[in-house]
Image (cartoon, rainbow, N blue to C red):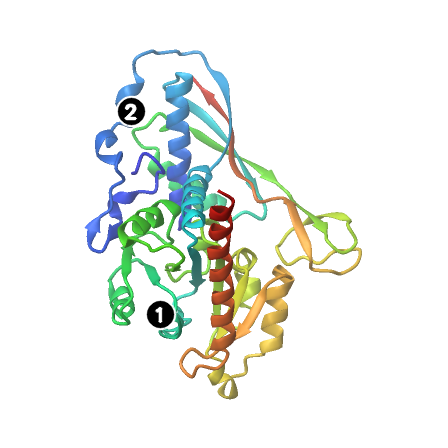
Amino acid sequence: MHEMTLAEQMLQIIEEAAIAQNFTQVKTVWMEVGRLSCVEKEALRFCFSAVVEETVARRAKLEFIDIKGRGLCAQCECEMDINTLYDACPACGSYAIQIIAGNEMRIRELEVE
Amino acid sequence: MCTTCGCGTKHIHMDGDILYHHEYAETVGGHTHHMHASVINESRRVRIEQAILAKNNHFAQHNRHYLAQQGIFMVNLVSSPGSGKTTILIETIKALQNEIPIAVIEGDQQTDQDAVRIRATGVPAVQINTGKGCHLDAHMVGHAMEKLDLQSNSLLFVENVGNLVCPAAFDLGEAHKVVILSVTEGEDKPLKYPDMFHAADVMLLNKCDLLPYLSFDVSCAIDFARRINPALQVIQISAIQGSGLQQWIDWIKSGHQQAAQVVMTEKAIL
């Protein structure tokens, strides 16, 4: 359940932003989650709701922004969408694919008051 | 929760003592009290653009920098429970401890049994108990490093919590993650738990002495692992019987020499 750690890290980022940007209530958290990242979204949603009790984010709605996986084939240099870490290149069949997007776990934006 | 990295250190023990970060005691409980000075009711958007694991990665870089300065080669052993991590570590220590100073950081949810086994070889070990936590993070490891009084040009092994999922996401500042797969597990494990095989640079295929009694397909397991990570180096071993261990020891020695060499070169330049 590393989602609990991730939720705690999210809260910490939000609390630091609350001090730096002077807000007292978070209404919405937009979080980017890459398809290939190590996050189970529903587990994270559950953990987030547990850690934000009695904090500035206690009423925050968590919105996920899905980022699709993109790979670059080291053999034929074509770019492609990928769904797993073991997808083969659709053009040449190679597994030597460098991930160029889809690993994201990032808070993009907050709606605050 | 530790206010520096947010890793929930209240539940974490190091050699039986509760681990507090140095800044923790001053700010504990301060989540909401310092935020009511000014009240603004208008809704607005705030750009954050911050990676969730940025803090951990910052601590990891700090650890990495220290290790590089000291010429210490750090390896993070990761696997599911029961793959033979501690036995591999003990055999590795026995083979190298007369040549190179070694220290070990042990991670488990509970008990110090692994650290006791390591200390029995004569090598210093710190046990981190993560409580409910499922992985080690860079902050815990940084504190364990402080506690170990590490020698320059030494080897530092981290035996992560037995878990093939969560430790993949956490950089500790190691030179390499080494994943251990034992042949008593399924050959499709790399496909089932791809993140770990993607994060590792070396795979030790352990318990190979049992292959005659199992239907485990070695070439299939290696093929699956290399679909995820084509550059993955694979070493087939039996920690109990010693087969393949020399290749693993040579790999460690070569990494250790490189780490020590970088420091020597930098000192020569200065």
Where residue A46 appears, as percent x and y from the top left, is: 40, 42
> Mark 2 sits on what residue?
B32
| Chain letter behind tag 2 | B
Q: Which residue is drawn at 62% across and 54% down?
A: A84
Where residue B78 appears, as percent x and y from the top left, is: 44, 61
Q: Callout 1: few (<14), some (14-19), or many (20+) C-alpha neighbours within 10 Å?
A: some
Q: Along the horizontal axis of the image, is B108 left or right of B262?
A: left
Q: Distance between the residues labelled 1 and 2?
A: 51 Å
Callout 2 amino acid: Thr
Q: Residue at x 59, y 63 (%)?
A: B232
- Residue B194, placed above or below residue B82: above
Q: Residue at x 24, y 63 (%)?
A: B112
Q: Along the horizontal axis of the image, is B218 left or right of B73?
A: right
Q: Which quadrant of the view contains residue A8? A: top left
In the picture as drawn, the residue positioned furthest to the left comes out as B17
Q: Nearer the viewer, residue B128 or B105?
A: B105
> Mark 1 sits on what residue?
B97
Q: Which quadrant of the view contains residue A26? A: top left
Q: State which quarter of the image contains the C terminus of chain A.
A: top left
Callout 1 amino acid: Gln
Q: Can residue A96 be seen in this view?
A: yes
Task: Give the label, 1 or 2, closer to the camera.
Answer: 1
Q: Which of A86 and B88 is in front in this view?
A: B88
- Residue B54, placed above or below residue B225: above
